[in-house]
Image (spheres, rainbow, N blue to C red):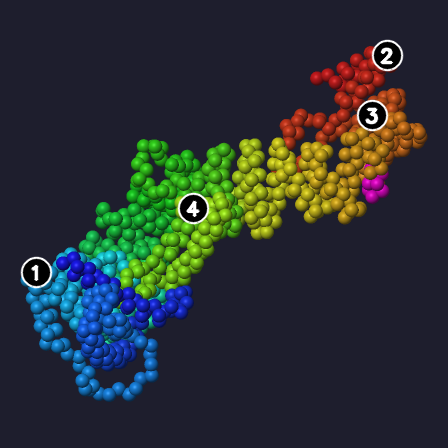
Amino acid sequence: MESKGSEIDEFEKALESALDGSTEEEEEDENEEREYSDDDGEEEDDDDDDEEEEEENALDSMEQNQQFEYEALAEKKRKTLADAKGEGSAKKARQEDMTGASLAEIEEIMNFGMRKKRRRRMPKRRGRRKGSKNKLSPEITRMLGDATLHYAHGNYEEALTVLSEVVKRAPLVADSYHTLGLVHKALGNTEKAMKFYRIAAFLRPKDSSLWKLLFSWHVEQGDIARAWKCLSKAISADPDDISLRSLHALFYDELGDHQRAAESYEQIVRICPEDVEAIKTAAKMHLNCGQIKRCVGILEDYLKGHPSEADLSVIILLADVFMEIDAHNNALQHIEHAQMIYYSGKELPLELMIKAGICHVFLGNIEKAEIHFSALQQENFSIHPEFITKVADAFMSTECFHSALKYYHMLELNVGADNEGEIHVKIAQCYLSLNDRAKAIMFFYKALPMLKDSIDARVALASLILEDAKEDEAISLLSPPKDLDSLDSNSYMQNPWWLDGKIKLKLCHIYKAKGMLEDFVNTISPLVRESLYVKTLRPKVKKRLTISVLRERISILNVQENDDVFGEVRPLASKSDLLRACRARKLLQKKEEQKAADKAAGIDLPSDYSDDESLLENRVSPLHDFLKDEAHHDLIIDLCKALQSLQRYSEALEIINLTLRLVSDKLPGDREDQLQSLLAQISFNATDPKHGFDYVRSAIQKQPHSIAAWNCYYKITSRLGKSHSKHAKFLRYMRNKHKRCVPPIVISAHQFTMLSHHQDAAREYLEAYKLMPECPLVNLCAGTALINLTLGFRLQNKHQCLAQGLAFLYNNLQLTENSQEALYNIARAYHHVGLVSLAASYYEKVLAACEKDYPIPKLLNENSEMENMKPGYCDLRREAAYNLHIIYKNSGAFDLARQVLKNHCTF
């Protein structure tokens, strides 16, 4: 028996490979992606066209059968002559003995029943052609009967032997393949049985039972593409089978093609106009596609076709559609029409009555609505809670909060309801809208045990508590549970409520209002940094597809390549998925080729070739619409100020730099200035002031004549040291661009003074004096530079230089109106060059003058230590008294020296 089984297998392979070859010739020139973008269903053609083509195929098959019988007789004669001449080659004899059919017969089977390209049709003749009916010979009929009896009695081996002989003699008989399938299924060879069923269905395409059998088997095997093909064939064989068309529509729905699903359901409606479920499903599919007009049309057509009696669910669905698009007037008209036509003299069904009342609510007819709702109040509350909920929600949507509360309280009586927590929240919202805060708080607290993960309920309750100045209670409400370690981790979601951005925002505002800066920073800083990080990466990150992802996308193209009568079967997927799979296959092929080339060249393979490489994490900003709201801008400024107060400068600098880089062009001017100012302050206080240099440089470029900006710049650059190359280049740039700008000239002169280059410093100060001769600072600096230059060894005309320096100092005295500071500077100059008598006289003038305190200039929001200084920090009498006592002491007037110290330098 093994030899017989092997002969059948070889026959199957030869037959199926020939069948597959026919389909490949027709499709080998088609472009793959173009093919996938074509329409799916060839079975979606009109039924009339299908019938015409099937009749044409039947006529063609009859002609082929006649030709095949002629060739079979000729083959028998050739075989008799070959036996007389002697046996041929062993291979050829074995092949003919095994199959009993030549290659020409296989080709005839291959072309049998296959749909050809549409050709020009000749006028059809009525009736059957003479001699076109192919009848089985009595011997073949007898053998099929014997095989059936063997199968019925369980003699499967004898049945296989007889059927094998039948196939050899008459390969085009579908019954033999069908019986072979039954025998193999009885033997447990399900896969082989299905192969024979395929051949039988192929030879008898109008037998829908075979296609249904194949469809069920392919679904069990998970071969959805071939199941779809079998389903299409079954519908072509039996177009009036509603169950098949329902499955067909369901396939489209699962693929997300609601449009074709709706069309399939409409075909069912045309076959069976009374199928209410098909009508409703078709309408819902059109509604999912956004085709509201078509959806309404289907439902209205049904109602027009049933003037005396209609299905209640269709009327309800039509009303729901109109209510969903806020066409409550149209919905009310249809309900009233249904009451007049279908329920004349009867009580309107409760659901329609409730919907009519809801429509009246939205139309402002509250009294009429209450009349309709009176029927609901007479019913048991627990029977129809969904109706009560809809009524209460309608009143709440129209801001009729008292009426809404009446129905919500009805629902509250239904203890143990699944949505009890949501009902309490809605009751609390109604009381809150009515300004009854006490009851709103009470019902929010009732809802929390049932809605532990409700973010909005907690935030709303916390806001109400804060209005009563109960900050500690609000903090406790928004903080994580105290027994967090003992809680079951599975009882909470992956993202617990206490980590939500809304909770953190509310909590940080409470901390800020209470002055708890450290808690404020620790609460909101991680969320702000994460949101900025996501915003920074999102425009730059390109999702890389690894080999594992590409293979997953290609998997929809991997239809099982069975050698059967179907040939190549198209994968079952949406057009977009098929196109994406084609692109993925091309990309994977390029990667594999590159991988092979790199491996041959001995190059180390990068991580892109790793199947285990995961996609970049799809990180989501914890703060919704971050940086788009002005409240977020203020939050960032407050956070940076708090970080500055806590001396966490590096974190503040990171946040400011990221913010300015992301939304500098979208920030309001005042907030951008605040951030820039904070950046400069923090940079000045931080260990490395380089971060602030860029800010002050940009600020000066915007306002080159601003003294405050240059003061900030000089403060920053004084900490950078001499070796900062950008500083010197920037000064040269500004002096060349703004030749009449004094601050960069003065700063350059200051640097020369610090380096003891008094001649260069004097030159720069004199240049500034030409531009601003009335500036006290320029006169003071020019005078001190000339006096310092007088003390040098290389200067020849020292007396003239000293006189010029003193002239600038006296000019400064005049400009400052004999201020104490100007007198002290002259005294110090005389003291410095050794003219002690003149110095003593000016020191005495300083001691006689009294200077009031002046505010010390500082940057915006700068925390200066001068604020805590004692009064009199601008008075120079102590300094003048000390210097004067030195002069008296050096001249031998010790008593005068002690008296000066006693009068002005004792505490």
Marks 4 and 3, how far apart at CA = 78 Å
Callout 2 crowding tier (Cα within 10 Å): few <14, some 14–19, many ≥20? few
Q: Dividing the picture into quarters, in which one does residue 53 lie?
A: bottom left
Callout 1 crowding tier (Cα within 10 Å): few <14, some 14–19, many ≥20? some
Mark 1 or mark 2, earlier in chain: 1
Residue 897 shows in this picture: yes
Q: Position of residue 856 (x, y in %)?
A: 69, 33
Q: Which residue is mark 2?
A: 892
Q: Quadrant of the C terminus?
A: top right
Q: Is residue 176 above or below residue 865?
A: below
Mark 4 or mark 1, earlier in chain: 1
Q: Secondary structure at mark 4?
A: loop
**Amino acid type of the residue tagged 1 in the rendering:** Gly
Marks 1 and 3, how far apart at CA = 131 Å
Q: Which residues are magenta?
A: 765-772
Residue 766 in magenta stretch: yes
**Amino acid type of the residue tagged 3 in the rendering:** Arg
Judge left or right: residue 278 versus residue 826: left
Q: Is residue 882 above or below residue 123?
A: above
Q: Which residue is mark 4?
A: 610
Label annotation for residue 828: 3
Marks 1 and 2, how far apart at CA = 145 Å
